[in-house]
Image (cartoon, rainbow, N blue to C red):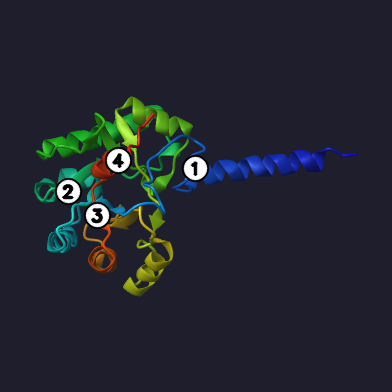
Amino acid sequence: MRKWPLAVGAAAGATGWAIYNALEPKAQGFGRAFVGTPGEGKLMALTFDDGPNTAWTPSLLEVLAKFDVKATFFSIGHYAREQPSLLREVAAAGHAIGNHTYSHVTMPLHTDETIRRELRRTTEAIEDAGVEMARVQGRRLMRPPYGRRRPGTLRVLREEGYVPILWSVTLWDWNKGITTEKIMRKAERQIRGGDIILLHDGCNVAMGWDRSHSIRSAELILTQWKEQEGFEFVTIPEMIESTGYRDP
């Protein structure tokens, strides 16, 4: 009997497994990353990537203040460098600040040295703005751009003193042609409690990117799940401490 079909099938299966664990936020095959406790409990966390954004971050801060909610912002380093006063506003409002690399690189495609440089440049930019990054269990927070990672990516993050943070609810608010209505339909299908919700207040392409649908969706999510259904929205450090998660 020819064995090559079995070998091809095994190779395809291994490739599929690797792709899934490199891209799927909740996958843990390449190592642990915190994704909340999807489907369990009443805690939830709103997270916003790719800011600060002069066009929409101020409006988002108003929405969060209206509901008395603290969120977690994963900042791009060169935006933190360009807009230190806006980053200070985010931190002064009590929100948690994490690292999202300096130039929004796809981390698995880069060397360990490049990843370390991206992390350190971002930390320097945030600290130069006079902002202290959020910490939990003595480590800072880091979210890989696009959620893409490999075992080496997670190893470097931990060696640099970071807890990897991903998400359990993807609302695709960065897609071309997205609307608030589409975002909310995705929210209705996915949100069950215990979730880390991914949204964006900025964009790695350019400062000033339109995130109006993201901000309006955040307001609607808070109206429905906080005001009507009684869920509690917390920062990522608060969620980690409340759930007892221990990073390796």
Which residue position holds label 1?
Answer: 22
Compute the Cα span from label 1 to label 3: 28 Å
Dot 3 crowding, Cα within 10 Å, few <14, some 14–19, many 20+ = many
Q: Are marks 3 and 4 in contact (CB under 8 Å)?
A: no
Q: Quadrant of residue 56?
A: bottom left
* Residue at horizontal 38 percent and vertical 49 percent from the top: 167
* Residue at horizontal 24 percent and vertical 37 percent from the top: 122
Q: Earlier in the sequence, mark 1 or mark 4?
A: 1
Residue 175, image x, y percentages:
39, 64
Question: Depth-wise, is mark 4 or mark 2 nearer the camera?
Answer: 4
Question: Depth-wise, is mark 2 or mark 1 nearer the camera?
Answer: 2
Which numbered circle lies on residue 233? 3
Which residue position holds label 4?
Answer: 240
The residue type indicated by label 1 comes to Ala
Which numbered circle lies on residue 95? 2
Q: Secondary structure at mark 2?
A: loop
Residue 50, image x, y percentages:
27, 51
